[in-house]
Image (spheres, rainbow, N blue to C red):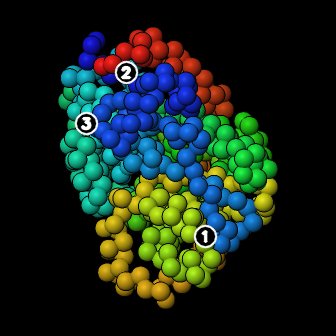
Amino acid sequence: MSNYVYGPTFAEMRDPSLLPQELREKALAALHGAPLDPINLFNITWKTAQDTVRHLVLPQALTGVRAPIAVLVGNGYPSGSHKVGPVYSCLIEKQLNGLIQPEKHVPIFPSTGNFGIGGAWGGPRMGYKSLVVLPEEMSRERFEKIRAFGADVIATPGCESNVKEIYDKVNELKQDPTYCSINQFEEFGNYRFHYGVTGEAAVELATWLAEERGIGSGRIGAFVSAMGSAGTIAAADRIKQSHPGAATVGLEPIQCPTLYNVGFGGHRIEGIGDKHVTWIHNVHAMDYMMCIDDQACLEGLSLIQEGTAVLAEEAGVPEADLECMQGTFGVSGVCNVLGAIKTAKVLDLGPDDLIVTVATDGFDRYPSVLEKLAEETGPPTRERSLRRLEIFHRATSDWVQEGTREVRTRWHNQKYFTWVEQQGKHVDELRALADPDTWVAHQKQIQDVDAKLVASRGDLAQLVTS
């Protein structure tokens, strides 16, 4: 159909230099010049205009550990977060399989924030009218961005961990066949994006840092990621294929330790800790589960954004690093940094053991969060910033759980309550997720998706003149 919009293959998201040169140049020009132009679908990549992986290496003056910590930076994606990648992957797979069509279906994006913002951006760029379902206590900026990108939004009761209420609203809406749920928590397009694109970026970055900057040995010691949909942590499955010794470390809030001890509760790390074990989380490949305090994440973000004088004068963080960190982190990004520091301490990783983690989004969706923090704790004075520096330097080694065989089995079995009892999955489907071949089969589907996409979209050169 002529009203279909197609974008990049997985191969092109991994390596946009595969695109026709004129198309790549047009897309890069639109990234800031025309951010709502559908050509920006071809900017869904971890690569910069120079075809290097978008990242920063945290200064040791901040982390206080011997192991280098590299952060994949997500705010350079269209929509301002890497979550637009899974949105595109899930939409394009359903479109290629004939399950969704522009002007016929309205995709629903159940989310606690960035996936919804990505859906608000991605759906209209592909010709769809998007609807986002989001907890009412998410940051003001999240709702503003969703509406600004042209989507409708429904606010459900609760905070970050109230995903059950989102599912209930989505199931109600799905009674109308016009609506099609793009559920990041169960769609393997999400898993495939991070396995095939994010994981590949991490592997490439480790080699580049060692060869070009003399950082690390080229070996990845650990991949650290908090779980929301548990899409990002799928990158570790790809990393382990190149670095078998790399540890996969998952993070969740102390205030909602669902995998750690079947815990529950509200918390303030937007984007993670959704009070259930997601369908697409390969828990049998996770080596450690660590918990991070939500207040530490909020105050850590305040230090990075508002405590630059203390970071420079007291910690000795170089000016160039301060500039790179400004605007780069949200609350969950700081959570990942604190988790990476904890990982370095718990696993006793050294200078040759690169730790890779992710800043999912940037600060642009959190000013109101820091305003609320200032109301609660007072303004970010020099004294408070000095205390907040200790959040990084004195990261503790408590709240750590090793993924033994018994623990991984429990993590797996916890999926039963959400997915079989509530969401209608069959128990045989659940059992299949314990088989490593199931995950390999999903990885191999990337080639099939790319082949279908190439056959459907026609000559890319036409997009340069369209």
Residue on which disc 2 sits: 464
Q: Between residue 298 and residue 208, name the one nearer to us.
A: 208
Residue 11 shown left or right of residue 122 in the figure:
right
The first of marks 1 and 2 along the sequence is 1
Q: Secondary structure at mark 3?
A: loop
Q: Name the kind of residue labelled 2 in the image.
A: Val
Q: Name the kind of residue labelled 1 in the image.
A: Pro
Residue on which disc 1 sits: 318
Q: Between residue 375 and residue 292, name the one nearer to us.
A: 375
Image x and y of residue 61, in percent: 65, 72
Report if residue 187 is visible in the image: no
Residue 148 shown left or right of residue 266 in the figure:
left
Q: Name the kind of residue labelled 3 in the image.
A: Ser
Q: Secondary structure at mark 2?
A: helix
Which image quarter: residue 78? top left
Marking on residue 188? none
Image x and y of residue 55, in percent: 57, 50
- Alpha carbons under labels 3 and 1: distance apart: 43 Å
Mark 3 in CB contact with mark 2 (< 8 angstroms): no
Q: Secondary structure at mark 1?
A: loop
Question: Quick one: label 1, few (<14), some, or many (20+) residues within 10 Å?
Answer: few
Residue on which disc 3 sits: 130
The first of marks 3 and 2 along the sequence is 3
Residue 416 shown left or right of residue 3 in the figure:
right
The residue shown at (21%, 22%) is: 104
As displayed, is residue 339 above or below residue 437?
below
Q: Between residue 289 and residue 62, name the one nearer to us.
A: 62
The residue shown at (32%, 74%) is: 372
